[in-house]
Amino acid sequence: MLFSKAKLTLPAIVFLVLLRLAIGWHFFQEGAVKVKDGFSSTGFLASAKGPFAHMFQSMIPDHDGMIRIDAKKMSEACESFGEKVKTEFGLNEEQCKEVDAILAEYKAKRKETYDEWKPQIEEYKNGFDRIATLQSDTSRSKVESLRRQQDDIEGKWRALGRPILSEIENTMPEMINRLNAIATDEQANPKPEKPPEKDAKGNPIRKRVEFKFEGEGPISVKTVDKIIPYFDMSIGILLILGLLTPVAGLAAGLFLASVVVSQFPGFPGTLPTYYQAIEMLGCFVVAFADAGRYAGLDFFPWSFWNRKSKVPA
């Protein structure tokens, strides 16, 4: 009863509108920059710390590189993908032979890389065991000097593997595209009774088989990178217009909450997320105060609903 009678003063309304506009403009600008300059969430996801770190890092395919760095595991992953291509497209015998030939070609290319980087690969594998041992010692995280030493060791270990993993990974898109291209248009159209959908250029959209490493989460970094820029811009536009403000504000607040949780407050070695936490709270205020009713498009449905509810039966 107390809350239903609460009213906002004029200064409170003015600053609520300004808060909504400021958050909206910030989200829109962030999204526009990401669309213009490109965006990768890999660094953000990889640096996650705390009890939910694994959930964020699982979005990065082969986060620790222990599949790509291992010739046998990588070959098994590629062969498994090849079998998936054969099954999902229903390839014939000749097409299956073509799949095997492509897999053999790229296996030979990877072998050249593995042979060239053999000493560094062994060092990287040994480093992984050392990192795992350090991470299992929870007492180290409580001592700042030991934690910094561990971060330094992990940083050098990742730097060692970066060029090797990059060289191996660079061959993957071409291999994946070639394997997907083997299927005919009929095999790549999962619903032959319907005409295939077309892309922006008017080309038919073919079914694709996506490559996934073992242990990769349901949401990959590629999906996140595609969604976030347009999510930011959409939230920004809705908040600036004051349209669907409760939904937009709640979505923005939950997104920022995920950023805060990725660097779990109080967990040793986390980066500060004060700014994100403050803006998160601002988003929830805007959402639950229904700030779009004031100098926003949400005023019109709100006004119509109020007039309708006051009409006597």
Image (cartoon, rainbow, N blue to C red):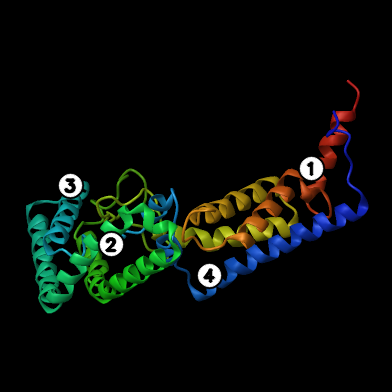
Q: Position of residue 294 (x, y in %)?
A: 83, 51
The residue at the point 76 percent across, 59 percent down is: 19
Q: Who comes first in sequence, dot 3 or dot 2?
A: 3
Q: Is mark 1 on a helix, strand or loop?
A: helix
Q: Position of residue 195 (x, y in %)?
A: 37, 50
How far, Cα to Cα, is label 3 from label 4? 36 Å
Q: Is mark 3 on a helix, strand or loop?
A: helix
Q: Of discs 3 and 4, which sits in the foreground? A: 4
Amino acid type, mark 1: Pro
Crowdedness near tag 2: few (<14), some (14–19) or many (≥20) residues, C-alpha within 10 Å: some
Crowdedness near tag 4: few (<14), some (14–19) or many (≥20) residues, C-alpha within 10 Å: some
How far, Cα to Cα, is label 2 from label 4? 36 Å
Q: Is mark 2 on a helix, strand or loop?
A: helix
Q: Mark 4 points at which residue?
A: 35
Q: Name the residue under label 3.
A: 87
Q: Of discs 2 and 4, which sits in the foreground? A: 2
How far, Cα to Cα, is label 1 from label 2? 57 Å
Q: Position of residue 26 (x, y in %)?
A: 66, 65
Q: Which mark is residue 72?
A: none
Q: Which mark is residue 301?
A: 1
Amino acid type, mark 2: Ile
Q: Who comes first in sequence, dot 1 or dot 2?
A: 2
